[in-house]
Amino acid sequence: MIKALITDLDGTILFNDAFPEVVREGINTLIKNGVKVYIASGRMLSSIYHYHRMLGLDTPIIAYNGAMIGDKDLNIIYHNPIEYSLWYQIFNMLLEEDLQINLYFNDSLYIFRKNGYGGNYPIQNKVPAFFVDKIEDLPELPTTKVLGIGDPDIVRKVQVQLKERYNSNLYITTSSPTYLEIMNRDVSKGRALSILSSITGISISEMAGLGDSFNDLELIMDSGLGITFDNAPLELKENADYVTGLSAPEGFREVVDFILWKNLY
C-alpha cells in the first residue's frame, strides 16, 4: 500500500512557474484517495513553501535535497549543514572557476559573483538575497548548501574534481546542467525519507518517490516505489520501478493511475 508520494518540484510537477492542470487534478485525486503528497526539492525551504501553499498542502517539506526539512509553518525540524571549515575549502575551489556561488545559511541566501547563468535567481525562487563581493562579508557559519552556477562544461569538470577530493565528506550532484549542488555527506532526497518516516509514521516501503533529474536518483532508488518519466536521464529510468510512457507533465496522470492501481492489488 502506497500511503505517500514524495515528488520533486521543478521539471516534475512545476513548469514555467505554474502547476499544469494535469498535475493539480492528479494531486487532488491522490489526496482524495488517502495518499499524502510531499515536496522534495533542491530549492530553499522558503522558496518551496510558496508552491506548497499553492497546492494547498499541509505536509512537511524536504528542502535543499534533503539537508533541511521544515513543517507547514516553516519551522525547521531537521537540518544537516556543511561545517564552515569544509565549505570554505569548497568555496575557494569554486573561486578558481567562472562560477556564480550561492551559499545558504539556515534558510538565508548569499550570492557571490553573480553571472549570466544564474539569471535572476532570487526573483525566480521568490526569496530575498544578500549580494556580496568580498569573502569577509560571508558569515563564518555552517551552510546548508553550496550551489555553483555556470557553463555546463565547467560544472561537469568541477563536479569530477570535487568528487575526487571530497566524495567521502560531501554529497555532490546536479539538478540541471548549469547547477552544481553540494551538501553535507549523508544528505540526499533518499536519505531524507528515513527522517520523514520518523516524523509521519509512514514506512519507506509505503512511499513512492517521483523525480526527473540526477538529484532525484536516491529518492527513486530508496523509496518503496521509484517512478520517473520517459524523458528522464537513462540512469534514473534504469533504477526506477516504473517509467511513464509519456514525458512530464503529461505523464503525471500515469503516475497517479499506477499508484492507485498498486493500492488495489
Image (spheres, rainbow, N blue to C red):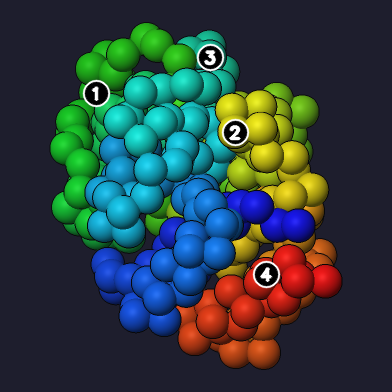
Kind of element beneath mark 4? helix
Instruction: Identify the disc placed on residue 134.
Output: 1
- Quarter of the figure with the N terminus: bottom right
Q: Which residue is found at the position 31% from the left and 13% from the top? A: 139
Residue 8 image position (x, y, % from top left): 52, 57
Instruction: Identify the disc placed on residue 43.
Output: none
Q: Quadrant of residue 244?
A: bottom right
Above or below 115: residue 21: below
Residue type of the residue flagged with mark 4: Ile
Q: Which residue is found at the position 49% from the left and 30% from the top? A: 68
Cα separation between marks 2 and 1: 43 Å
Q: How crowded is mark 4: few (under 14 residues within 10 Å), some or many (20 or more)?
A: many
Q: Do the residues labelled 4 and 3 touch (CB within 8 Å)?
A: no
Above or below 63: residue 150: below
Q: Horizontal placement of 159 versus 10: left or right?
A: right
Badge nearest the viewer, 1 or 3: 3
Q: Quick one: label 2 or label 4, which is nearer the N terminus?
A: 2
Q: Residues within 10 Å of mark 3 (few under 14, many from 20)?
A: some
Q: Are marks 2 and 3 in contact (CB under 8 Å)?
A: no
Residue 64 image position (x, y, % from top left): 48, 39
Kind of element beneath mark 1? loop
Q: Quick one: label 1 or label 3, which is nearer the N terminus?
A: 3
Relative depth, front residue between 185 and 26: 26
Badge nearest the viewer, 4 or 3: 4
Q: Which residue is found at the position 32% from the left and 30% from the top? A: 74
- Quarter of the figure with the C terminus: bottom right
Q: Are marks 2 and 1 in contact (CB under 8 Å)?
A: no
Q: Mark 2 points at which residue?
A: 200
Instruction: Identify the disc placed on residue 83.
Output: 3
Relative depth, front residue between 86 and 223: 223
Instruction: Identify the disc placed on residue 259.
Output: 4
Q: Quick one: label 4 or label 1, which is nearer the N terminus?
A: 1
